[in-house]
Amino acid sequence: MGGVPKAAPKPDVTTGEPRPPQAPVITKWKTEGKTNKSRAKFPQAPKGEGPLLEWYQAEESDSTIGGIFLGLAIVGFFCIRDWGFSWMSTWWLWLFAIWPPIVSYFIGRRKGFSAGADWFATSSKTYVKLYEIRKVTVEYQAGGQSIGIELTDIHGGFAGASLRQLQRKRALWDLVYNGIVYSVHQGPATANNLALDKLQLR
């Protein structure tokens, strides 16, 4: 990044202009999940806030594929542990291998994320004001298989998501990241060490 990142000007709450510059990401995706707004599920703009500018929801297949790979990894672990396939005769061990695709499919059907110029929501019940964030936390989840981000604002608003999934829709992530940078370097926000590293905030 070439030093501590500086937040771009806060976009107009109605038009979203000027749009923030492109934010750094952990993974570059070739696709952005669902593109048909009428078939997607995501939080609408909170009452009293500016309009929804960007939204994202993963395809169910994206999540399921990840679950299949995790299941295959578990099968491989059992084969290596037993030096063969003898574990397959124990029926309950198969439960460890088949649950990831099933659970991942339903995870992929969950509602997505949405953002306006100065707000971000992962739920219809609560959202954060991006330029009034109080705390930024990034933590490893699922035994290190994923990275989660949690944002809390000074009003008690909260939003949490998979960091890689949040970064998948670049235009949405740009809005969120600019608010994080502003809140950390010009506002009241604190960030844990992993957040400083993964979000390149140092």
Image (cartoon, rainbow, N blue to C red):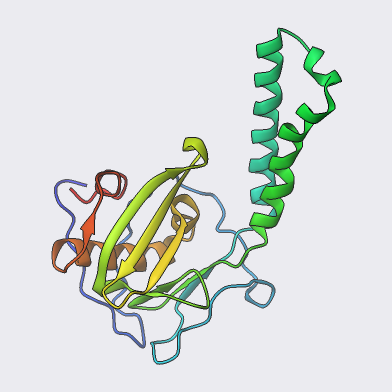
Q: Is residue 181 left or right of residue 185?
A: right
Res 26 quadrant in image: top left
Residue at the top extreme of this rendering: 83
Q: Percent position (x, y) of residue 164?
A: 46, 50
- Vertical placement of residue 7 versus 108, above or below: below
Left or right: residue 110 compared with residue 52 = right
What residue is shown at x 65% (from left), y 27% (from top)? 73
Can you see residue 71?
Answer: yes
Q: How many marks?
A: 0
Tell me the residue at 71%/7% (across/down). Answer: 83
Please tell me whether residue 96 is drawn above or below residue 60 in the rendered image: above
**Residue found at x 36% / y 88%:** 14
Percent x, y for residue 200? Answer: 25, 48
Query: For this view, does 10 lie left or right of residue 115?
Result: left
Q: Quadrant of residue 179?
A: bottom left
Quarter of the image for residue 65 reads top right
Pick the residue in front: 133 or 21.
133
The structure residue drawn at horizontal position 74% and vertical position 47%, both measured from the top left corner, is: 102
Q: Position of residue 58 (x, y in %)?
A: 60, 59
Residue 90 percent coordinates (x, y): 83, 22
Q: Nearer the viewer, residue 128 or 181?
A: 128
Q: Can the viewer see residue 26? A: no
